[in-house]
Each structure stands twice: as structure tokens, then as C-alpha cells.
Image (cartoon, helix red, strand yellow):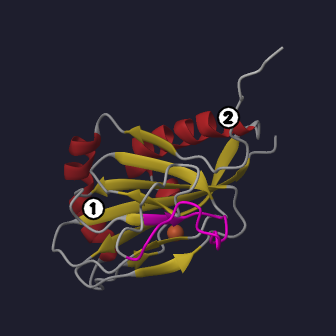
Amino acid sequence: MQTNLKVSHWFPTALGEAYYPNAEKEHQRLLPYIDKIKGEKDECFNYYPVHKDKKFNDINKFILTKVNEFSKRYNFGPMKIKDSWFNDYKRHNINSPHAHLGSIFTAVYYLVGYTEDVSLVIHSPIPPDMMNPSEVTTNDPLKNVNPLTIDDIIIKPSTGYLCIFRSFLSHEVPLKITDHKRISLSYTFIKDVL
Ligand SMILES: [Fe+2]
């Protein structure tokens, strides 16, 4: 008979993470191409179908492979890319909280990024714990918290870093206050029904 307390995790969300091995080379090759796509207008959000552009073939393939590995953990079966776009963040750009409706998974890949730059923040789907059992304070908002109780996942951008999460999770990029280059490719995924 088991007398020790057995604790298993059931409802917390999951985060998939990987690094693209050829990231620096791809970054150098694609940077001028990104500028060409943007043309005259210099906007943060660029609704451009990255997943349909052959120049991004190797990155796209890598991301789809990793998303399918992640999907296997959920038993959801094969995924296909539904939509994609890229964001070229400049100083004072911001991306308010949102979720990617109509998709199952979201992947964010940093074509170029620096960890000291503004993070991507993914919010917990669990509502605030009004009883405050972790005893967090305004001064110490991370007091006693762990992956079971934390409110946000903080993703520090770096060249070649990929993260994958469920599309219902609200996420945002707070105000950017540096001049570091920060270009992210975003993808959404739905089931690949054969
Ligand atoms: Fe997003």
C-alpha cells in the first residue's frame, strides 16, 4: 500500500522549447529579405505568409517538426500550419494581451533577439488566487511561487529560440525600451486531417 503522498500534475499548461541549430546563418541570410518584404512601410506587425515562402523552408520545416512532437504529448495527432506572420519590434512598440482564436497551438520563433530585450509574457489560464496562499506581496510578487502557482511565463527572446504553447493562452509583449533587433516569426496550427 502506498503511504507516501503521491502528487501528479494534471491541469497546468505546457511549454515546448527548442533551438534551431542553423539560426545565426539563417538570420544573416533572411534579414535583407525581411527588409525587402517590408518595403517602404516600417511597421511592427507584418501579416505575411511566412509558411508559404520557400525562403523560410528550413525554418518552417523545423518548427512544424517540433510542433508535431509537442502535439504527440497531447495525443492530438498531426498538425498543419494555419497562419503565419512576423513582427519587427522597434523601441516603443507594444503588443497587448491577446489569444490566437481558431487554432490549437502557437509557435513563436526568434529570427533575431536578445535576452536583455523585452520578453514575451504568457499568462496563466488560472484566475487570480484570491486567498494568496503563496503570500506574495507587491514588493515580492514571486514569493514562494513555482511552476504550479506562477502567474506568467517569461520568454526571453534569443536568436534561434522557438517556443510552443496552446493558442488559448493570453500573451503579450510589453513596451520595448531598447534598440536591439527583435524579429519574431509567429505561426498558428490546426489539425492536419487526412
Ligand atoms: Fe500572439
Quarter that holds the C terminus: top right
The residue nearer to you, when weighing 4 against 153, is 4
Residue 64, horizontal then vertical, whole percent: 55, 42
Residue 185, percent from left and from top: 42, 60
The residue lying at 77 percent from left, 21 percent from top is 3
For residue 112, what is the image quadrant? bottom left
Mark 2 or mark 1, which is nearer the start of the sequence? 1
Query: Is the residue under label 2 in contact with that under label 1 (CB below 8 Å)?
Result: no
Count of numbered badges drawn on the protein? 2
| Residue position for label 2 | 73
> Which kind of residue does numbered mark 2 sit on?
Arg
Expressed as whole percent of the image width and height from the top left, the position of residue 39 reads: 28, 78
Q: Mark 1 — residue?
A: 33
In the rendered structure, does residue 127 fall within the stretch colored magenta? Answer: yes
Residue 192 quadrant:
top right
Residue 154 appears left or right of 74: left
Q: Residues within 10 Å of mark 2 (few under 14, many from 20)?
A: few
Q: Is residue 185 above or below residue 130?
A: above
Q: Quadrant of residue 72?
A: top right
